[in-house]
Image (cartoon, rainbow, N blue to C red):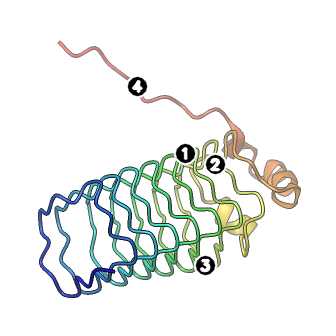
């Protein structure tokens, strides 16, 4: 396992790299390309990955506690069983991401795109879901999720929910289940 503690990897081209279990704590990864890299069980606690290109990355079981993923592109990433406690995922693209059994305790997901994401068994205590796109996401079997958290999301259209949430939410917040409006696309000339 690589020890990259405190390394300067700004702008590094690490796409597809096998970095299983690597220690990145204190490492500068600003602007790095980690597309499709294998970072299973890697230790990235506190690393700033704001705006980094992480499509298809494998973070299964990784320690990502407190990591700054602000507006990062994590589309189709594998974050199964990852520790994202206190992570900043505000505005991140998590479209189709696997967050099954992930620890999201106190994470900031404001305005994130979780369309089609799998959150089965994820721990969501104190997770900020304000204006999150959960269209088509799977939230069955999540832990510590509250109706109040779900009432603040952008959409629950086509979202898979346990009955304990589905019935009260449809009673009180029916508009969350409406078909989302498509952006108004104007002809550009």
Disc number placed over residue 137 in the picture, else none: 2
Q: How far separated are the C-alphas under marks 2 and 1?
A: 6 Å
Between label 3 and label 2, give the one nearer the viewer: 2
Q: Which mark is residue 115?
A: 1
Q: Nearer the viewer, mark 4 or mark 2?
A: 2
Looking at the image, residue 150 sits to the left or right of residue 154; the answer is right
Q: In the image, 3: left or right of 163?
A: left
Q: Nearer the viewer, residue 51 or 172?
A: 51
Of the two numbered discs 1 and 3 on the same chain, state the one appearing first in sequence.
1
Sequence order check, earlier mark of 4 and 2: 2
Residue name at image x 72 percent, y 76 percent: 144
Task: Report how far apart the C-alphas of labels 3 and 2 lie in the structure.
Answer: 19 Å
Label 4 Cα neighbours within 10 Å, binned few <14 / some 14-19 / many ≥20: few
Report how far apart the C-alphas of labels 4 and 3 lie in the structure: 34 Å
Between 41 and 112, the residue placed more toward the observer is 41
Q: Is residue 129 above or below residue 6?
A: above
Mark earlier in primary sequence (3, 2): 3
- Callouts 2 and 1 close, C-beta under 8 Å: yes
Name the quarter where the C terminus is drawn.
top left
Sequence-wise, which precedes: disc 4 or disc 3?
Answer: 3
Q: CA distance from mark 1 to mark 4?
A: 19 Å
- Dots 1 and 3: beta carbons under 8 Å? no
CB under 8 Å between discs 1 and 4: no
Q: Residue at x 38, y 62 (%)?
A: 38
Q: Is residue 14 left or right of residue 183?
A: left
**Residue beneath disc 3:** 126
Q: Position of residue 8 (x, y in %)?
A: 12, 78
Residue at 56 percent of width and 74 percent of height: 104
Q: CA distance from mark 4 to mark 2?
A: 24 Å
Say which residue label 4 marks.
184
């Amino acid at each position: 396992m690589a020890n990259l503690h405190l390394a300067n990897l700004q702008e590094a081209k690490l796409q597809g790299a096998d970095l299983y279990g690597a220690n990145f704590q204190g490492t500068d990864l600003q602007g790095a390309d980690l597309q499709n890299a294998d970072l299973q069980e890697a230790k990235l606690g506190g690393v700033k990955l704001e705006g980094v290109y992480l499509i298809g990355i494998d973070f299964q079981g990784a320690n990502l506690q407190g990591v700054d993923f602000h507006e990062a592109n994590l589309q189709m990433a594998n974050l199964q069983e990852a520790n994202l406690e206190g992570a900043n995922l505000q505005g991140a693209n998590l479209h189709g991401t696997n967050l099954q059994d992930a620890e999201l305790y106190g994470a900031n997901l404001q305005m994130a795109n979780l369309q089609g994401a799998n959150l089965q068994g994820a721990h969501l205590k104190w997770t900020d879901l304000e204006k999150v796109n959960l269209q088509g996401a799977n939230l069955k079997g999540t832990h510590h999720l509250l109706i109040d958290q779900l009432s603040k999301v952008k959409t629950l259209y086509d979202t898979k929910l346990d009955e304990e949430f589905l019935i009260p939410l449809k009673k009180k917040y029916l508009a969350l289940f409406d078909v989302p409006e498509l952006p108004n696309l104007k002809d550009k000339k």
